[in-house]
Amino acid sequence: MLSAGLIFFLAALQGLTELFPVSSLGHAVVIPPLVGLSFRQTDPAFVPVLTMLHLGTAAALLFLYRRDWARIIAGFVRAAVRGRVETTDERLAMMLVVGSVPAGVIGLFLQDPLKSLFGDPRLASGFLIVNGAILLTAEWFRRRDERRLAAAPAPALGHAEGDPSYVAIEGLSVRTAVFVGIFQAGALLPGISRSGITMAAGLFAGLRHEEAARFSFLLATPIILAAGLLEVPSLGSDAPTALVSAGAAVLAGVVAYASARFLLRYLRIGRLDPFAYYCAALGAAGLVFIH
Amino acid sequence: MRGSGPLAIGLVVLAVVFAAVAVFYYTVKTNFLASGHPALHWKHAIVFTVLAVLCLVAANFARPKAART
């Protein structure tokens, strides 16, 4: 059985790492053995507890983008009934649906087989290094694209026709939304960050850093919320753990909200490189020190 | 976007198929495309229900529409 202290520690860790492109699940698997916490990763309550924490972070995202979600939901209903997209909010709603379907379907069929991998810290360490490589690759492509645009302005994947600048998410094409959505399925692997891989895909598709993060957060919300809601019944058999997890979910939500606000401000001028190096270092530490 | 009758019809058929699969997972104990012992897989049922609704939405987008004046 998981202790209350460990659950609250995981909650703070979850809130901090869910939205940063550093893999919250990877941290939850790698950090405890790395710091010497006695923790049974095969504990049947492990995944459902993390899922409760996901609910906390999903709530934080819903609150952060509450006005956007109100417009997006209304836009989806209007466009669905009308059978035609007429506004940017309706277009964004459809892009989010298109982007969420691949990860939702893939997650449904692969989540159980991959659950057995969730508790392996060495595997998660390896994937953290891969995560770092993905972020660095995305930044490398972005810098190359910027050099090319500076030399000879030309449209690229995801840009509006004839527009040499980087797009906002409302201008995404269906193809790009599907592309980013498929990348999100990669986060099923422990150590691969959902936000990181979708931000990387967004950068590759031509979004500005801040817009890539915004699309990543919007795209993650329905997936995280659905995954959490579907797993909540599995906590019911152990009432004390469920109550503690609920409190921890609130903690995770508060920390996640603060983290998201910080990251959005940072990405106005910053890049993903520091997160990439951090993931690589943590992954390497896990491979070296965890036996 | 120009509508396509056959595409819209195909999407409606797909929606019916997904709805039928959702009913199947909710009412029949099985482990088809699911892990573990044969059981009622309500998560699969919910996902296929959502897919059925999205197919109907897509069909509404795809159906031919009268030109706006």
Image (tube, coloured by chain):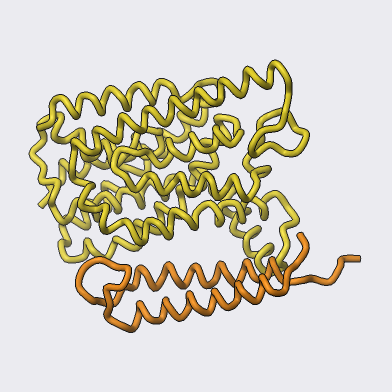
A279 lies above or below A17: above
- Of the chain colours in the picture, the one used for chain B is orange
A245 lies above or below B40: above
Q: Between residue A228 and residue A21, name the one nearer to us.
A: A21
Residue A115 pos. (x, y %): 24, 53
Image quarter where the C terminus of chain A lies is top left
Please identify the quarter of the rendering in which residue B34 is found: bottom left
List the single residue furthest toward the right. B69
Q: Is residue B7 visible?
A: yes
Chain yellow in the figure, letter: A
For the point 23% across and 63% down, the residue is A234
Locate residue A32 relative to residue A146 in the image: left or right: left
List the single residue furthest toward the bottom. B27
For the point 31% across and 39% down, the residue is A24
Residue A82 pos. (x, y %): 72, 67
For the point 50% across and 68% down, the residue is B51
List the single residue furthest toward the front. B6
A221 lies above or below B30: above
Please identify the quarter of the rendering in which residue A233 is found: bottom left
Residue A119 pos. (x, y %): 18, 45
For the point 26% across and 33% down, the residue is A126
Q: Is residue A12 visible?
A: no
